[in-house]
Image (cartoon, rainbow, N blue to C red):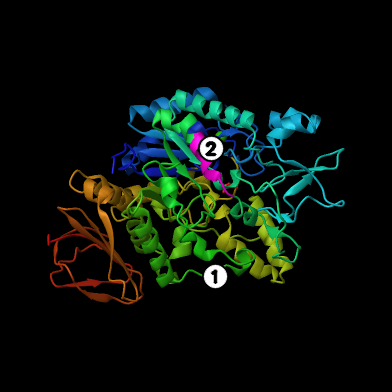
Amino acid sequence: MNKKWWHDKVAYQIYPKSFLDSNGDGIGDLRGIISKLDYLKELGIDIIWLSPIYKSPFVDQGYDIADYYAIAKEFGTMEDFDELLAEAKKRDMYIIMDLVINHCSSQHEWFQKALAEPYGEYADYFYFREGKNGNPPTNYRSYFGGSCWEPVPGTDLYYLHMFAKEQPDLNWENPKLRQELYQMVNWWLEKGLAGFRIDAIINIKKNLEFPDFEPDGNDGLAACWKMIESADGIGEFLNDLKENTFRKYDAFTVGEVFNMKEGELSSFIGEDGYFSTIFDFNAHSLSNGEHGWYDAPPIDFKKWRETVINSQLEAQGCGFEANIIENHDEPRGVSRFLPEYAKTPSGAKMLGTVNILLRGIPFIYQGQEIGMQNAVWNSLDEFNDINTIDQYHLAKDAGLTDKDVLKVCEKMSRDNARTPMQWSSGENAGFTTGTPWLKVNDNYPEINVLRQDKDRDSVLNYYRRLLKTRKSPEYKEVFTYGEFIPAYEDTETIMSYYRQTEHQKILIAANFGKEPVCLNLETPIRRVILSNQKNLPKPEQFLKLESCEVIVAECVED
Ligand code: GLC
Ligand code: CA
């Protein structure tokens, strides 16, 4: 395998709107981010992914871009952005941005021109299609509910939008559109950006026959991803994109890829793959409900363990995956993947260790490093997320009581990850001196950066040690390139694996159970290098793990 500059890096996702507000308008901004670069450096972060900061009407929180060349005024100016790039560089850190090119905002100039001339040049930047007998062209349901087709005023045409109606899909079949996008990507890379996180990228290839599908809900519609799964030939688009942009700059790219076909992983992340890496969402997909959030199954430990292990084994055959616990679209990992008794600092450390020492590129989501949790939500009004509002009504239509509907959203809402970052126990958790755009989690007096900074045993200080261990000269090689080998899979509650090179073998073992477990060690341990307990165990033949205990240990070479 050829070594790449990003193989040993640790990444951190910033959701700018909720990170830190520097001017009291209740919205996080670029100056807020600049002021926390040292905090991130000290944590052990190399690459920072910024969720969209482009000009946008924020119907989907910036994932609806009105101008790819402009910074949203809410976040600051292009000068602020250039300063961020320069300040990151000074600290040997890299900035990557979100690349949202499956769709743009309905306020983008291209779409406005298309509406003005529905049979003109710009209509072909989008999917404008005739309706069928007074109905939309097909029966697809958008990800945020309702039809994927919206009438083009004054015509019999409809335009396609797989997300909100304010997010029209871009027509990648049009070579002119593709050239415009490549130019834009290169413009940012020229500026000094290190790469991109690439949004909803599997959606760019449509099945141009646009077949109807068997309805799968009470609305008579069928999930639009079924059309995406029926499309062939995305590889040509993705190669073309890479060859015309990323490759020339040796950029780091991480794809948001769902609905991949069997056997395709190596074409995405292999030596010559379309991307450097893609996120591993397999564990998150375990809570996909058949109809929506309201029938999402709970996470079962053994299933979760098996899923993580299988993902690792598959990925190491071809490349590196990006490992996450949570992101801006997912509930908090501590609330989701840990049983009730483990939603504690020990549990957060255990989950973090198991995830971050996997083979791949770790991505930490803002607040994860202090163990942030889902919020308590009292009514629909408190939410902002477009997806949550749709899922709320879906659950209600399915007959759930008001109380249960709220519980569903509390468990699954994307706003759980979007509540402001908890910096201190001061007003609004130190996020803003104004009124925060989304409510602050009530638990901020206990869970916040300032408090944890002073406490040696906090989740934050543990994450610092964890990343330090991963990146230390002694262990960097094994944690970056070491093989992943699952261990103790026949136990009820232990999640465990080795990372191994020719010279080193490291054991990671965590007890997700409520009771202590005693493992009969299959490979003797030389020394424990990290643990979330105060007293480092001195295992020889046996290893006793308390509930929520995790250890990282160097094995005696065999
Ligand atoms: C991705 C983003 C999500 C957004 C969607 C549409 O899934 O992560 O936040 O709503 O794409 O752009
Ligand atoms: Ca602000």
- Please provide the residue range marked out in magenta: 232-241
- Name the one closer to the observer, 363 or 265: 265
Residue at coordinates 71% horizontally, 40% vertically from top-left? 127
User: Mark 2 — residue?
Assistant: 99
User: How many numbered dots are placed on residues in this image?
Assistant: 2
Q: Which mark is residue 297?
A: 1
Q: Main secondary structure of the magenta part?
A: helix
Q: Could you say which is closer to the camera, residue 242 or residue 413?
A: 242
Quadrant in which the C terminus appears: bottom left
Distance between mark 1 and mark 2 Cα atoms: 31 Å
State whether residue 84 appears in this view: yes
Q: In the image, residue 209 lies at what x, y percent?
A: 70, 49
Query: Is tag 1's residue or tag 2's residue first in the polypeptide sequence?
Result: 2
The label nearer to you, 1 versus 2, is 2
Element type where label 1 sits in the image: loop
Mark 1 residue CB less than 8 A from any atom of ligand 1 = no
